[in-house]
Image (cartoon, rainbow, N blue to C red):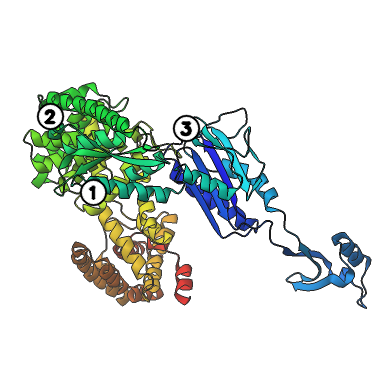
Amino acid sequence: MKFLLEIGCEELPPNFLPSAIQQLKERMEKLLYEKDISFSNLFVYGTPRRLVLLIDDIAPQQKERIVEIKGPPYQKAFDEEGNPTSAAHGFAKAQGISLDELIIKEDKQGKYVYAVKKESGRPTEEILKETIPSLLNSVYLPKSMRWDASSSRFIRPIRWILSLMDDKLLELKIGEIASNRISYTERYLEGVFSPESVDDYLQRVKVEGIILDQEERRKIILDKAKELAESVEGEITIHERFLEKIVFLNEKPHLFLGKMDERFLVLPREIIATSMESQLNLFPIHNKRGELLPYFVGVRDGDGKGLENVVEGYEQVLKARLADAHFFFEEDLKIPLKERATALSGIIFLGGLGTIADKVRRMRNIISSLPIEEIRERALRTALLCRADLTTHMVREFPDLEGIVGMNYALLQGEDEEIARAIYESYQYTLSEEGIKTPLGKLISLVDKIDTLAGAFHLHLQPTGSSDPFALRRAGQTVIEILREEERFNLREIIQAVGKAYKEEMGVELGGMEKLLEFLRNRLELALREMGIRYDIVNAVLEGKMENIRELFARAIALNELREDEEFIPTVTASVRLINIIRFAQRRGENPPEEGIKEDLLLLEEEKGLYEEGKRVARTLEILRRKEDYKAIFRELSSLKDLINRFFDKVLVMTEEKELRANRLALVNFIWNLFFLFGDLSQIVIERQRNDASS
């Protein structure tokens, strides 16, 4: 048997369809497994006007099940001579079986009587009728809507439902729309047909040119686009997100080649490409050197009838778009970016935190505070220009081009190539060849995003749940990624520099900085866990110093790789003895003295030995830290474990003699601080480690 469910809708947004398809497939598979309904293949297809669920070889009913029902205890069901009691008779009668069919089983609670019954499976049709409406309602999408008086919600209003089990109509209802033996091949509920069976439906849509399978549409579009580009000795560059959009915008893809006016080729490549891709869904064509050619590939959702009119229409619209862009381009270049930067005072940054011009001044203030002497002048220049393109006609018309316009205008106006690239990178969020990659770009992007984060948390605009209108999570993740690569930047020092800039430039005393640090800590935790770092090791390193993020990642990776080492557990255990005694003293109101260790009060050989070896290890650690060799650092610390254990076995730290007790606490604290280079190792779950080692 084959089962088909087609949900016909008003035009479906292409960006929502991949998630809807994946969720529908996963939920349906889960439902069938839970209900014990067998099948061979399950497919979910999505087009602009329909979601289609197709299941091959679906069983007509659930599998027969053997069910064991627990009854009374054996002692109550049978007497001392083994004869059934009234309890056994009553249980057998209630279950509809004879006494001979009762079985005895023993568990932890003792012997019990069981009834073993065969349960016939329910018809698949009944189960699907009951479950499909709620299954569709369970598909989560960021934006859904109601379209009738029912409480049903979906991406777009549902206009028809086709539900077939082979050649039989499966009657179900979603909202106020009932299933019917009707489907449509065209927009606006035109091209109506009534399939006699699932196979008839599949044949009819194929004849009409509808390609249900999105992977097949992808291949058709890709292959034909490359073929058309090659016909004019060109190539197309495929951006996956753009290709996916085209795939889900068309269910009858018919590709064509169009031509653009060559005079517009003087425009920067990105401006032309954006006009084509973002606004008209066209593929630009370029030569092997990456230079744009005066051609494009478009996709029509339909057949080839009147295609010449469609091509001419696209060419005219593109010409108008590029004519506007050409005008903006020439007008914009009349004013240097440096002069444009003064106009940023007319663009609000965040309510209560001034304008973009104020933000630029803060960024320059922050840059002046950082230890970046070798690139400071270029960084100050980049910060001055990095938001100037927001005042251009081009960006106002094409907001997606912010940063790209700034980079191209900077190059055309004679700015250094590194500065121009950094202007573009300041708008980006990912470290990659296409995103943030240069040292100057990393610096400007870091300063920009830290300034935004600090201002947002001061105004209590931090993300809540799924709401993050200012993309602060992305900004936080970018900050973490940059700091992971740039060891010269200290997180707390940068945040302090931001606070100083807000105060000096705007007279604002920033609040919410502890919440910002906690937010970044959560971003760090997420990044470490995604790398496969154990949860307890993540907790351990995050309890340590968060200033040097590059070092923090290196510490976590080293600990995670060393956790199977035979010295790992003994070393961690020894370090935990140190912090336990410190915490015990602190609960009594005693902290290790700030003046440090007095060598003349080290009376026992175990004290002296631990102190001397601790000093040697401390010197070695400084050398190894510069080499960023954290595995070697851990092994050096491991060399202290036997001395630590002998110290605690032979030395009474919490002695009655106050001065001696304080000195011994100072020694314990000195050694603990060596281990604290990794973080709080007491967070590591020792028992779990033992279990892992033995398994």
Q: Is residue 48 above or below residue 396?
A: below
Residue drawn at x 23%, y 21% is 346
Name which of mark 1 and mark 2 comes first in the sequence: 2
Q: Position of residue 544 (x, y in %)?
A: 33, 56
- Residues 621 and 229: in front is 229
475 sits left or right of 195 in the view: left
Q: Position of residue 208 (x, y in %)?
A: 47, 41
Q: Amino acid at mark 2?
A: Leu
For discs 3 and 2, the disc positioned in front in the rendered view: 3
Residue underneath mark 2: 337
For discs 1 and 2, the disc positioned in front in the rendered view: 2
Residue underneath mark 1: 490
Contact, CB < 8 Å: mark 3 with mark 2?
no
CA neighbours of label 3 inside 10 A, class few (<14), some (14 to 19), many (20+): few
632 sits left or right of 374 in the view: right
> Quarter-wise, where is residue 174 in the image?
top right
- Residues 264 and 79: in front is 264
Element type at marker 3?
loop
505 sits left or right of 77 in the view: left
Contact, CB < 8 Å: mark 1 with mark 2?
no
Q: Is residue 432 above or below residue 671?
A: above
The CA span between labels 3 and 2 is: 48 Å
- Residues 539 and 580: in front is 539
